[in-house]
Amino acid sequence: MTGSNRPVVATGVAIVEGDEILLIKRANQPHQGLWAVPGGKVDPGETLAEAATREAKEETGLLIKLDEVIWVGESIGDDHHLVLIDFLGQAIGGELAPSGDALEARWFIIEEALDLEMPPTMYELVEVLLEIKDEDESGN
């Protein structure tokens, strides 16, 4: 692993509307060209929630209302070690306009996201979203 030998904290937001999730196509490494939730590294002095809403706005142009943390995990590669903390969220304003680390931003049916090229951690997050959806539909 190059660069810092310490893990870096990063946040993401699963922006969900009905049975769809908003994903971005990553412009930069790690996982360049793959679909993922908007997110990024937490800056010094910034809370997890502040980082998540900032990154979502930078990458999608949308204002986000955060709900609970729904997934925590790690992405470890030759060039990175990220501790990932993902929130559930919803768009409450702004206009969809990908920029920053996002080449593209598109809505996908949550189940169909499993067929996309995504970082390995994203498949785990989508499975969590499907479990939440099943619980909501069954009334539990």
Image (cartoon, helix red, strand yellow):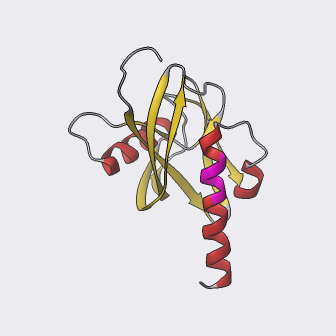
Q: Position of residue 135 (x, y in %)?
A: 63, 76
Q: Single out the residue that lies furthest toward the bottom.
A: 139
Comparing 26 with 1, the one in front is 1
**The C terminus sits in image quarter:** bottom right
Identify which residue is drawn at 51% across, 30% down.
Answer: 99
**106 and 36: which one is in front?**
36
Image height of 66 relative to 33, above or below: below
Q: Position of residue 28 (x, y in %)?
A: 54, 22
The residue positioned 53% from the left and 36% from the top of the image is 75
Q: Is residue 22 magenta?
A: no
Q: Is residue 91 left or right of residue 48?
A: right
Residue 105 seen in the figure: no
Q: Quadrant of residue 83?
A: top left
Residue 5 location, quadrant = top left
Residue found at the far left of this picture = 45
User: Majority secondary structure of the magenta segment?
Assistant: helix
In front of the other: 109 or 132: 132
Q: Is residue 134 left or right of residue 38?
A: right
Q: Estimate the x, y position of residue 57 in percent, counting from the top left.
A: 43, 42
Residue 126 part of the magenta segment: yes
Q: Position of residue 77 (x, y in %)?
A: 55, 26
Residue found farthest to the top: 2
Question: Is 27 on the left or on the right of 118, as rendered?
Answer: left
Q: Which residues are magenta?
A: 123-127
Q: Is residue 134 visible?
A: yes
Name above or below for residue 86 compared with residue 140.
above
**51 vs 70, nearest the viewer:** 70
Residue at the image point whose x is 59% and y is 52% from the top: 125
Residue 99's place in the image compared with 70, above or below, is: above
